[in-house]
Image (cartoon, helix red, strand yellow):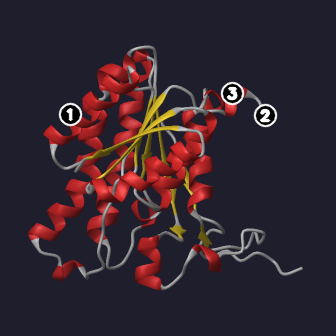
Amino acid sequence: MSDRFAVSGTAIVTGASSGIGRAIAERFAADGADVVVCSREQDNVDPVAAGIRDDGGSALAVECDVTDRDAVEALVEATVETFGGVDALVNNAGASFVAGFDDISPNGWQTIVDVNLTGTYHCTQAAADHLKDGGGTVVNIASVAGKEGAPYMSHYAAAKAGVATLSRTLAMEWADEGVRVNCIAPGFVATPGLESQMGVSSEDVDRDDVDRRIGVSEEIADVARFLASPASSFVVGETVTAGGVPRGEEVPSQ
């Protein structure tokens, strides 16, 4: 495979204790990148880094709450001290809960916006100088909910719409700085979070069937790998939807 499809240098992946974030970190490490994985609990992210190292990769685990600017600054500092810089940033940390709009408290609304949108702001701004030093990539994880809306998830949909728009705007601002910013909008993905809410696990997903409505974390990791690699050099400011068969459209039976 061409080296243009490989991620190199040093990458920070937030929300990497499980699901999409973990899969992305493992993909990047398999390419030879030095990967920094973070989560709010050190005990949750240590096994991820250990697994990467066991497979011959290079990884550092850092406890970090992306809503805490001081913690984010410390994350970036630890990355630079250990690996010498930041070449790729994947803003994957997210949170949500199901509730009707009328039932979402101000605190509940603020919590979801803080994690999904403000956390993306914190991490990207904190890593800015290092990303601009030699040209880097930012991959933000949004959601189809931010494009289409999502009943009973208005707080999450609004925050993810903000992530997608921030990605487009920042891509224009930072293009002259040599930094490419792109975004992924996953649909339903069989993560531990989805399993707890809907009872669907990755073992229930038939990856050989194109007519799928639920994906697996590795499929989103493949898109992130492309966007963080030189292979996507002409892709700037885009939100790539990875959501399976579009809603309302059926694949004809054979």
* Residue beneath disc 3: 4
- Tell me what residue is drawn at x 78 percent, y 34 percent: 1
- Tell me what residue is drawn at x 30 percent, y 61 percent: 158
Q: Toward the viewer: 87 or 33?
A: 33
Badge 1 amino acid: Glu
For the residues labelled 1 and 2, the Cα–Cα distance comes to 36 Å
Q: Toward the viewer: 126 or 23?
A: 23
* Residue beneath disc 1: 73
- Whether 156 is drawn above or below 23: the answer is below
Residue 151 is situated, as x and y percent measured from the top left of the image, at 36, 78
Q: Is residue 250 visible?
A: yes
Residue 92 is situated, as x and y percent measured from the top left of the image, at 40, 51
Badge 2 amino acid: Met
Mark 3 vs mark 1, foreground winner is 1
Specify few, some or many for label 3: CA neighbours under 10 Å numbering under 14, 14-19, or 20 or more: few
- Tell me what residue is drawn at x 36 percent, y 32 percent: 170
- Whether 177 is drawn above or below 64: the answer is above
Residue 178 is situated, as x and y percent measured from the top left of the image, at 45, 18
Q: Is residue 169 rendered to the left or right of residue 20?
A: left
For the residues labelled 3 and 2, the Cα–Cα distance comes to 8 Å
The numbered mark, 3 or 1, whose residue comes first in the sequence reads 3
Determine whether the residue tagged by mark 1 lies in a helix, strand or loop: helix
* Residue beneath disc 2: 1
Callout 1 touching callout 2 (CB < 8 Å) = no
Badge 3 amino acid: Arg
Determine whether the residue tagged by mark 3 lies in a helix, strand or loop: helix
Q: Residue furthest right?
A: 254
> In which quadrant will I find the C terminus?
bottom right
